[in-house]
Image (cartoon, coloured by chain):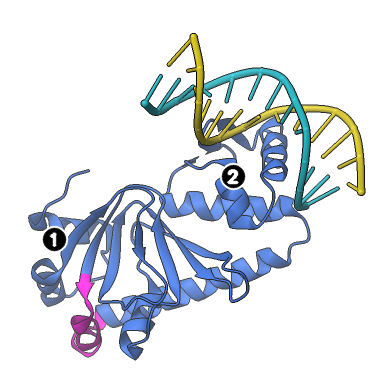
Chain colours: A blue, B yellow, C cyan
Amino acid sequence: MKYSQEDIPSILRQHFSQLADKGLQEELATVGQLMSFEAGEIIMDYDSYIRLVPLIIEGSIKVTREDDRDGREVLLYFLGAGDTCSMSFTCCMTDKRSAIRTETLEPTTIIAVPVRYVDSWMTKYQSWKSFVMRSYDQRMNELIEVIDSISFTDLDQRLLAYLEARSSSTKSKVIRATHREIAMDMNASREAISRLLKKLEQLGTVELGRNEIRVLSPV
DNA sequence: ACATTAAGTGATT
DNA sequence: AATCACTTAATGT
């Protein structure tokens, strides 16, 4: 979808209704930059400085962390419309380099907020403060789920958790991904994923197509 | 038409 | 559950 700067107020109403302060909305409309990305673009990478806090209004983003060992990537979580990247708050307030990489999974549009406002708005606008707090809380919970899912013994349940996380970030039943991609996210072999997906299809949980997985029954 | 990439399958460890 | 070897199917050029 095509957005322009004038749409920001209505976008805020639609996806970020929690940000209720009138003044905040006005500031966002003037100071926020709409940015669009193709699928597969890396918005932030490891070690880069973060100058922006993104409010995601459309699309889906995968957040990963680099493994200390052998450059492997560890999947942290997915972000979708209405989300923001909690890590970017921490990074910009502590002036640290990014410990994460964010990559778009689909065409994605964000409102980019320059970091210098992020801090001052905390005291200025109650709704901003609680938004930041809430998104921290949400993210923390998701991370706990990820950790739980790692401790799942079988790949079976981990895959379900993955599909669920990914489709809820998009608010869509259709996941555009290859088996290979999923396998890499989960540190599993492609064949294993293919076989499990096939099994899920036979159970009616899911419907498979090339580059595409439809989640039928809620996971 | 040909090459490339995604996905399905069986066997082996 | 990983790896290998191979097939089949879909897509891109």
Say if residue A218 shows up in the picture: no
Q: Earlier in the sequence, mark 1 or mark 2?
A: 1
Identity, as a three-letter code, of the amino acid under mark 2? Arg
Image coords of residue A35 (percent x, y): 21, 58
Compared to A199, does A193 lie above or below? below
Image coords of residue A53 (percent x, y): 28, 73
Image coords of residue A152 (percent x, y): 74, 62
Image coords of residue A69 (percent x, y): 63, 74
Residues A218 and A201: in front is A201
- In the visual, does A21 lie left or right of A80? left
Compared to A178, does A44 lie above or below? below
Tell me the magenta residue range: A113-127
Cα–Cα span, label 1 and label 2: 40 Å
Identity, as a three-letter code, of the amino acid under mark 1? Pro
Q: Identify the chain of the residue marked 1, using the numbered disc in the image.
A: A
- In the visual, does A114 lie left or right of B9? left
- In the visual, does A59 lie left or right of C7? left
The quarter holding residue A21 reads bottom left
Say if residue A79 shows up in the picture: yes
Comparing marks 1 and 2, which lies closer to the viewer? 2
Which residue has dot 1 on it?
A: A9
Q: Are marks 1 and 2 on the same chain?
A: yes
Instruction: Estimate how packed mark 1 is, as few (under 14), some (14 to 19) or many (20 or more) residues with alpha carbons within 10 Å.
Output: some
Overall secondary structure of the magenta section: helix
Is disc 1 placed on a helix, strand or loop? helix
Q: Which mark is residue A180?
A: 2
